[in-house]
Image: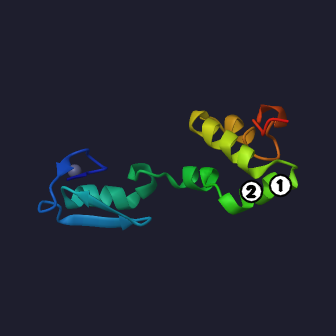
Amino acid sequence: MAKNPVCGMEIGDKQARQKSLYRGETYSFCSKDCKVKFESNPEKYSNVPEDDVSETRLDLYSLIETAKANGLEPYWYLKYLFENLPEAMTADEFTVLMPQKVDKNMLAGPAA
Ligand SMILES: [Zn+2]
């Protein structure tokens, strides 16, 4: 069962005659109307709006490099990041989790 992203109707695989591929995901539609609506503005209907993807995609490799460059121990930094990332809702809350901005005193670390 796929959920029609436009009208919210549940569509069985056999009923899904109208399909559209967007950003690697297949979306199914109950009718041509719904498909046309989706394709006119896929960002609005797809699960992952394009803006969110570009803003929140974390490149783990560059994150680790940036953490090191800022004098952070990558393990403790990533632990802190992944503990707090799910709670971050606003751009500001994301920003303070970035290695350049993170409060080093907030990171746990090996016992001294
Ligand atoms: Zn529909």
Outermost residue, front side: 112
- Is the CB of the residue bearing disc 1 within 8 angstroms of ligand 1? no
- Is the CB of the residue bearing disc 2 within 8 angstroms of ligand 1? no
On the image, which quarter does residue 87 sit in?
A: top right
Which residue is pictured at 32% across the width and 56% down the height? 37
Q: Secondary structure at mark 2?
A: helix
The residue wearing badge 2 is 64
Check whether the beta carbons of the residues at disc 1 and disc 2 lie within 8 A of each other.
yes
Marks 1/2: CA–CA distance: 6 Å
Amino acid on which the number 1 mark rests in the picture:
Lys
Q: Which mark is residue 8?
A: none
On the image, which quarter does residue 15 sit in?
A: bottom left
Q: Secondary structure at mark 1?
A: helix
Left or right of 41 on screen, residue 57: right
The residue wearing badge 1 is 68
The percent position of residue 77, horizontal first and vertical second, equals 74, 45
27 up-or-down from 102: above or below: below
Outermost residue, left side: 14
Left or right of 52 on screen, residue 19: left
The percent position of residue 82, horizontal first and vertical second, equals 62, 43
Quadrant in which the C terminus appears: top right
Which residue is pictured at 26% across the width and 51% down the height? 4
Left or right of 21 on screen, residue 54: right
On the image, which quarter does residue 57 sit in?
A: bottom right
Amino acid on which the number 2 mark rests in the picture:
Ile
Within 10 Å of disc 1 (Cα), the crowding (few <14, some 14-19, many 20+) is some
